[in-house]
Image (cartoon, rainbow, N blue to C red):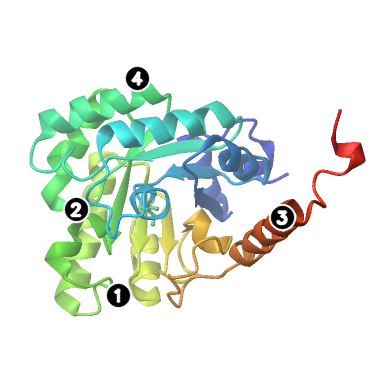
Amino acid sequence: MSVAGKARKITTNTLQEMKDAGEKITMLTAYDYSLAKLVDNGGVDVILVGDSASNVMAGNETTVPITLDHMIYHAQCVVRAVDRALIVVDMPFGSYQGNSRLALESAIRIMKESGGHAVKLEGGAEIVDSVKRILTAGIPVMGHLGLTPQSIYKFGTYTVRAREEEEAEKLIADAKMLEEAGCFAIVLEKIPAGLATKVSQAISIPTIGIGAGAGVDGQVLVLHDMLGITMDFSPRFLRRYLNLSEKIEGAINEYVDDVRSGEFPNESEQY
Ligand code: KIV
């Protein structure tokens, strides 16, 4: 049986064993109880309570506005639903950058108040002090390199990162630094596939890619994008497994018509 198949609950150790055994890791986002339950039942290994909640749940243009309290609320909802998957919670913008003490306090709040299993931070050398300080409290940390959406106002666009040699070299050095600091895995977002493969071979902890090709140790997508709930975002890397927005809108139109025409409720739907 596969490593993931044997695990009653997925832990950071399971993910390492999966990489070592050449087994791909699956990760999806979730932000609420009902969908998190479906994602867990579907057999996903890692559920990310992503700060993409800022976009898909709150309707913000970027991930910058979401707060620590918001992230803890979403994580609490997910934790109540999940039996098997490892739950990783994004630390939001402003809760860890440039201040390792604040980072530790924020991470402790996430763990204590939500019941999540690990936290994720964006960045490399700039945030490694925060990563190390969080790890001193025994809190597992996932890194995130490449396109780091919390820095959108520095990048200016959401295009592919690290195409140039200098940025690619920094990314490899950052990945090694995060591994050395003690991260249990690293998300690689929107970087050339060749570079992502190189990083995955250069470090021994798992890499999870989004728009980073097939040479990484696992894949992650934003749930609302892959289910086709959000339709205004169609990057090349995104595979839509459903077109739920069409189905949901169709069902709602039908309901509206049935109520207006008096077709709903019928005799068997009343007391
Ligand atoms: O917030 C998020 O959904 C993420 C993924 C894109 C990896 O960080």
Amino acid type indicated by mark 4: Lys
Front disc: 2 or 4: 4
Local crowd at mark 4 within 10 Å, few (<14), some, or many (≥20)? few
Residue 95 drawn at (x, y percent): 18, 37
Does the CB distance between marks 4 and 3 fall below 8 Å?
A: no
- Point out the tag, 1 or 4, that comes first from the N-terminus: 4
Amino acid type indicated by mark 3: Arg
Amino acid type indicated by mark 2: Gly
Q: What is the CA distance from the residue labelled 3 to the residue labelled 1?
A: 49 Å
Q: What is the CA distance from the residue labelled 3 to the residue labelled 2?
A: 57 Å
Residue drawn where x is 19% and y is 35% of the image: 132
Q: What is the CA distance from the residue labelled 1 to the residue labelled 4?
A: 36 Å
- Point out the tag, 2 or 4, that comes first from the N-terminus: 4
Does the CB distance between marks 3 and 2 fall below 8 Å?
A: no
Circle on res. 260: 3
Q: What is the CA distance from the residue labelled 4 to the residue labelled 3?
A: 48 Å
Front disc: 4 or 3: 3
Q: Secondary structure at mark 3?
A: helix
Query: Is 18 drawn above or below residue 221 in the view shown?
Result: above
> In this rendering, would 230 be left or right of 81?
left
Name the residue tied to disc 1.
Answer: 160
Does the CB distance between marks 3 and 1 fall below 8 Å?
A: no
